[in-house]
Image (cartoon, helix red, strand yellow):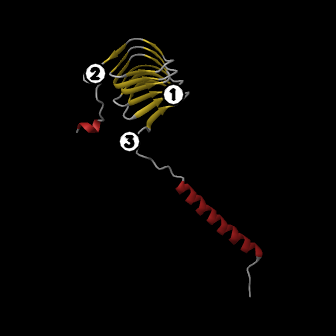
Amino acid sequence: MWQPPQREQQADERESSRAEEAEDKKDMQQRDVYQPRDTHMASGELNALLGRGSEFEGKLAFEGKVRIDGTFTGEISTNDTLHIGEGAKVSAEISCGTVIVEGEVTGNIKATSAVELHRPAKVRGDITAPSLMVEKGVIFEGRSKMDSLEASNVVTLRAAADED
């Protein structure tokens, strides 16, 4: 019985082995594909994060929960939750639903729901909110005013598509 020479047989084996490797790699890539999740489905999930070492200057308007761990200068407005993490430095006029502060804030804070100041927060500015919680060890230099929910003048933000 005739058999092909050894070299051709080895080349055929390498060719089929490469095809198998390519197929395996393709399968792995398909399994590793990022599957986006609806962030509004689970409570407590972040919509955006300005991480440590990041700096941003301007106006920030958002829906959902946003956390700032970096440096921000400007204006922040939302009806939802802003979390200023430990180590963050924010110099802004803030108008939100709920504000949680663990970092440093210079500027006035107006909240329609609540403001929470957790150690080691440092806030220099006035706070207006129906609910204010200050943890022991927080530095707060400013005035506080307890406004009812009805007296708040925070404007509701809507996407352009919502106006149709």
Residue for badge 2: 148
Q: CA distance from mark 2 to mark 3?
A: 27 Å
In this rendered view, identify the residue nearer to me: 156 or 28. Answer: 156
Residue identifier under label 1: 69
State the residue at coordinates (51%, 24%). 88
Q: What residue is drawn where x is 43% and y is 46%?
A: 37
* Residue 17: percent from left, percent from top: 66, 66
Query: Mark 2 falls on what kind of element?
Result: loop
Count residues near mark 1 (Cα–Cα under 10 Å), then give few for <14, some for 14-19, many for 20+: many
In-image side of 159 versus 94 (left or right): left
| Residue 36 percent across, percent down from the top left | 45, 47
Check disc 3 and report the residue beneath it: 40
Q: Residue furthest front?
A: 136
Q: Is residue 155 left or right of residue 52?
A: left
**Which quarter shows the N terminus?**
bottom right
Q: Quadrant of residue 91?
A: top left
> How far is disc 1 from disc 2 in space, using C-alphas?
30 Å
* Sequence-earlier tag: 1 or 3: 3
Q: Amino acid at mark 1?
A: Asp
> What x and y, as percent, mark residue 49?
48, 33
Of callouts 2 and 3, the N-terminal one:
3
Q: Residues within 10 Å of mark 3 (few under 14, many from 20)?
A: few
Q: 45 and 68: which one is in front?
A: 45
Seen at 29% across and 35% down, the residue is 160
Which of pointers 2 and 3 indicates the residue nearer the eye? 2
Residue drawn 57% across the image and 57% down it: 28
Disc 1 on helix, strand or loop? loop
Q: Give the farthest residue toward the right.
A: 6
